[in-house]
Image (cartoon, rainbow, N blue to C red):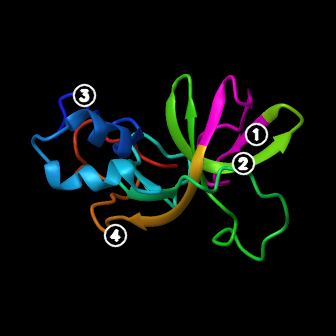
Amino acid sequence: MDPGFDEQRTSNLGRMVERWGLVPLSYLAKFATSEFTYGYIGNQDFTMYPILPPGSFIQVDETRTKVLEGSWRSEYERPIYFVETREGHTCCWCSMRREDVILQPHPLSPVPVRVLRHPQEAEIIGQVVGVAMKLTEWQQVGSSSGSKGQPTLN
């Protein structure tokens, strides 16, 4: 893995692949030129938990950068966006208010809503269209067998 990769932070793997070049993962070079980019939800990013738990890999359609407004029958129908901010990347629901983008976490998430200037402080990279995640290794609150430094959810 790229030495600059931090599993604690959410990141854009497509841009990381561009930096890798021919080594060590040259077979992933097609990701850098496709209409999709790929991201990783950092181990400390609970923004869209439980829909997108930390440690998930996401596929992002870079052609879908316009925030869709409307009503959805369930939280699974509502588009999730991959957003780049000055602090890094995140996945969240979004809504627009004039020149601001409102970054909305899942209601069960401990992460607060953020309002940022668009596009100066936040850029919509695209819509999340695919996800790969583990369905194991989650510990109950108060469990002593968690990995060192892993946050617990209340």
Considering the numbered disc 3 on the image, is that residue within a helix, a strand or a loop? loop
Label ID, residue 135: 4
Q: In this view, does 4 lie to the left or right of 67?
A: left
Q: Name the residue under label 2.
A: 94
Indicate the quadrant where residue 19 lies: top left
Q: Residues within 10 Å of mark 4 (few under 14, many from 20)?
A: few
Question: Is 105 colored magenta in this rendering?
Answer: yes
Considering the numbered disc 2 on the image, is that residue within a helix, a strand or a loop? strand
Q: Are marks 1 and 2 in contact (CB under 8 Å)?
A: yes
Instruction: State which mark lies toward you, 4 or 1.
Output: 1
Label ID, residue 143: none
Cα–Cα gap, marks 1 and 2: 5 Å
Instruction: State which mark lies toward you, 1 or 3.
Output: 3
Q: Mark 3 points at which residue?
A: 4
Considering the numbered disc 1 on the image, is that residue within a helix, a strand or a loop? strand
Tell me where the magenta segment starts and ends, as one range: 101-124
- Residue pictured at 74% horizontal, 31% vertical: 118
Mark positioned earlier in the residue sequence (3 or 2): 3
Q: Name the residue under label 1.
A: 102
Q: Which amino acid does label 4 sit on?
A: Leu
